[in-house]
Image (cartoon, grey):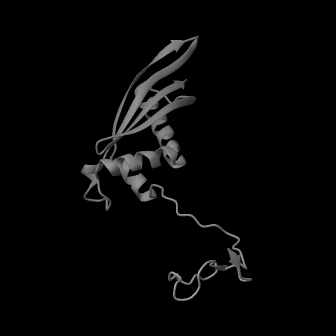
């Protein structure tokens, strides 16, 4: 196959009436300037939606204080439930299982959610333990089941 100077291939073989009809091809455009920025579309939970979810969450906490290794500690768990169908009147998106799965994945990656869960765990450890803890550590698991999202928090606090 021979090429012309422009880079467009010149067909070899029969020319004229015996040749099969080929569509004319234009050469690819050459990039003469490049952009300094790449653009991407990112999806994350809306701040107003997070406010709504945490305000309307069902919260269940259990635990107790005990002495462990000579220190006063609290061991417990807190579970938050976000019932999307119950919020369908104020949420524009579909409140179904696929939305719950998508939202659960986004909640796991959102730093603001981790901070809110940590603050909630501290409040619940204070309420259930009867005093404000000095330190609080948590282990968080977020999952979707049907159209509900569950956030399970294991809490350990010291007084």
Identified at 25% across, 50% down, the residue is 85
Front residue (pair 58, 41): 41
| Residue 136 located left or right of residue 1 | left
User: In the rendered view, would you say 101 is above or below 38?
Assistant: above
Front residue (pair 12, 93): 12
Identified at 53% across, 82% down, the residue is 19
Q: Quadrant of residue 29?
A: bottom right
Front residue (pair 45, 94): 94
User: In the rendered view, would you say 26 is above or below 95?
Assistant: below
Looking at the image, which residue sits at the far top?
Answer: 69
Identified at 40% across, 56% down, the residue is 49
User: In the rendered view, would you say 8 is above or below 106?
Assistant: below
Q: Quadrant of residue 12?
A: bottom right
- Which quadrant does the C terminus fall into? top right
Q: x%, y% of residue 131?
A: 48, 27
Q: x%, y% of residue 74?
A: 48, 22
| Residue 132 located left or right of residue 48 | right
Q: Count the marks.
A: 0
| Residue 140 located left or right of residue 10 | left
- Which quadrant does the N terminus fall into? bottom right
Camera sees residue 54: no
Looking at the image, which residue sits at the far bottom?
Answer: 16
Camera sees residue 127: yes
Identified at 47% across, 21% down, the residue is 75
Q: x%, y% of residue 103?
A: 40, 49
């Amino acid at each position: 196959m021979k090429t012309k100077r422009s880079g467009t291939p010149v067909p070899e073989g029969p020319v004229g009436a015996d040749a099969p009809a080929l569509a004319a091809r234009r050469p690819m455009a050459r990039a003469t300037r490049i952009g300094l920025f790449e653009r991407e579309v990112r999806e994350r939970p809306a701040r107003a939606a997070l406010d709504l979810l945490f305000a309307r969450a069902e919260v269940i906490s259990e635990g107790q204080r005990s002495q462990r290794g000579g220190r006063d500690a609290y061991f417990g768990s807190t579970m938050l439930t976000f019932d999307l169908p119950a919020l369908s009147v104020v949420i524009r998106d579909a409140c179904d299982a696929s939305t719950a799965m998508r939202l659960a994945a986004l909640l796991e990656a959102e730093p603001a959610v981790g901070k809110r869960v940590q603050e909630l765990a501290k409040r619940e450890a204070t309420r259930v333990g009867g005093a404000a803890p000095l330190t609080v550590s948590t282990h968080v698991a977020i999952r979707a089941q049907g159209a509900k999202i569950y956030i399970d928090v294991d809490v350990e606090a010291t007084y």
